[in-house]
Image (tube, grey):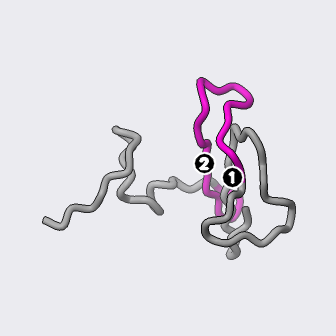
Amino acid sequence: LFHGNEYFTYYGHNASIDAKLHQFVSIGDTIARSGNTGESSGPHLHFEIWKDGEPIDPLKFFPNFSKKSDKFQEESNE
């Protein structure tokens, strides 16, 4: 998906791709269905963020996601 300002996101191993080429999508729209295509150990989301042709660490955009646990960490109110 192209997000503007040379930002792109890529999603891989999809069972299906529901968004069409050049389609505008909104928050909540289904763009693809998780799958197990290619060399994959099981159904999962392969997700990449790119800017200006270079990959960016997605954790910069999702600081509450922990690599160690592979789980989203809820922010504590304490």
- Confirm whether the magenta stretch covers residue 6: no
Residue at 82 percent across and 68 percent down: it is 23
Q: In what quadrant of the picture does the C terminus appear? A: bottom left
The residue at the far left in this view is 78
Residue at 67 percent across and 72 percent down: it is 26
10 to 75, vertically: above or below: above
Secondary structure, mark 2, is strand
Q: Quadrant of residue 24?
A: bottom right
Q: What is the magenta range?
A: 32-54
Q: Amino acid at mark 1?
A: Tyr
Q: In what quadrant of the picture does the N terminus appear? A: bottom right
| Between 43 and 55, the one nearer to me in the picture | 43
According to the image, label 2 marks what residue? 47
- 3 left or right, relative to 67: right
Across and down, in percent, residue 19 comes to 79, 59
Q: Amino acid at mark 2?
A: Phe
Across and down, in percent, residue 4 comes to 70, 75
Discs 1, 2 touching: Cβ within 8 Å:
yes
Q: Quadrant of residue 5?
A: bottom right
Across and down, in percent, residue 55 comes to 62, 53
Residue at 39 percent across and 52 percent down: it is 65
According to the image, label 1 marks what residue? 10
Q: Quadrant of residue 25?
A: bottom right
Secondary structure, mark 1, is strand
The local crowd at label 2, few if under 14, some if 14 to 19, many if 20 or more residues have their Cα within 10 Å, is few
The residue at the far bottom in this view is 5
**Mark 1 vs mark 2, CA separation in Å:** 6 Å
Across and down, in percent, residue 33 comes to 69, 46
